[in-house]
Amino acid sequence: MDELSLRDRRELRIALTAITLALALALSGCSLLPKEEEALAPPLVKPAKESYQTVNAEKGDIAVTINGTAYFESVHTEVAQFTGTGGRIKDILVSSGDEVKKGDVLVQLVMDDLDLQMKEQELALEKAKYNLKQTRANQDSEPEVVRMAALQTQIEQLKYDRLKEKYDNKQLVSAIDGVVTFVEDLKPGDYVDTYQTLVIVADPTKLRLTLGLDSSDNLNGVSVGFPAEVNVNSDGQKAKLAGKVVQTPESAPQTLNKDLAEKYARTLYIGVDKLPAGVRIGMMANVTITTKKKEGIVKIPRSGLRNSLGRTFVRTLVDGSKLREVDVEAGLSSATEVEIVNGLKEGDVVVLQ
């Protein structure tokens, strides 16, 4: 009995020791886990003040203009081309920029001994004329002999005229005094067709400006007689000249030439009465044509006008910081500015896009 009591006490002691050890381990395990850090409050950041690009609505003038670089060209040009028959080139006697006189030979075709035939027929004609003169001078000549001599002279003249026509058809001559502005790129031996443009001669004393248009140009209201401001640099001297529109696409003459019709459809022609010395074909000039103009109106840059869902409006700044949308009525518009008919007054601050 005493032995059992002793064993029980030993087991009880072991059990208590184990429990004590387990509790100690549990408590020490909690202390091994890292402590949770306290959450830091986010720093207070002062919001940045929003900035806008602004402009004040102002009173002034507005104009719709057509601007561009124009080139001087001749009002009168002659196109040299063979009309009777084509042939092979013998010689091209001119180059672009050459000055020519009326009647000067520009291009020659291969003659095929036609020039020799011309000389022979010229001699035959002279011989017939001389024979007729001698026959008439001889008082003993019978009327029939005189008539036959005259008839022979006519025959030789007809032969000469026909050869002369063929000869003339073998060469191109200038129809006017002027400057050569175009020569087809050909060489001796090349074949040319009838009505093929070979040379263009222009009269340099009568010039006008040709202004090519692009698809964005608005020609509403532009008509013959409209004034134009012309700025030209001639021989280093700048000059401002007064010109006027002399031809528009609407007033252009009808033509069957497709290329010319296309040119007329996209070109304004401006005449200038008094040209300074030194202005030549091909020189450039800056041209401004005012199509519409209003004075003393309220206007803003076009970048300040907004459109959305059928609305036309602007954004304005009130008291330097309050943003407000204002419906407006727009009027005349130029390349950079727009008229505001209603909705704004002079001095209003407009936010640009």
Image: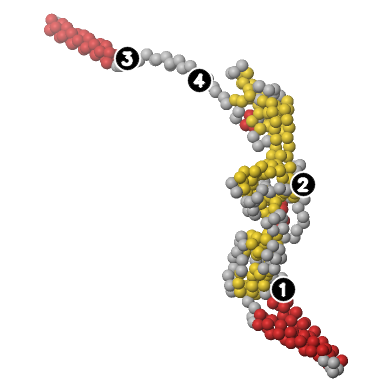
Per the image, label 2 sits on a secondary structure element best described as loop
Kind of residue at disc 3:
Lys
Amino acid under disc 4: Ala
Residue appearing at x 72%, y 80% in the figure? 163
Q: Earlier in the sequence, mark 3 or mark 4?
A: 3
Left or right: 42 as drawn, with respect to 316? left
Q: What type is the residue that disc 1 sits on?
A: Gly
Tell me where residue 201 appears, x and y as whole percent: 67, 62
Residue for badge 1: 84
Q: Mark 3 or 4, which is nearer the eye?
A: 4
Spatial separation of the CA atoms under disc 3 and disc 2: 93 Å
In this view, the residue in front, 270 or 151, is: 151
Q: Mark 4 points at which residue?
A: 48
Secondary element at tag 4: loop
Rendered position, 79 above or below 351: below
Query: Percent x, y for residue 111?
Result: 64, 78
Distance, label 2 to label 4, CA atoms, is 58 Å
Look at the picture and state if 103 lies above or below 341: below
* Among the 4 quarters of the image, the one containing residue 116: bottom right
CA gap, disc 1 and disc 2: 39 Å
The residue indicated by pointer 2 is: 224
Left or right for 70, reference 51: right
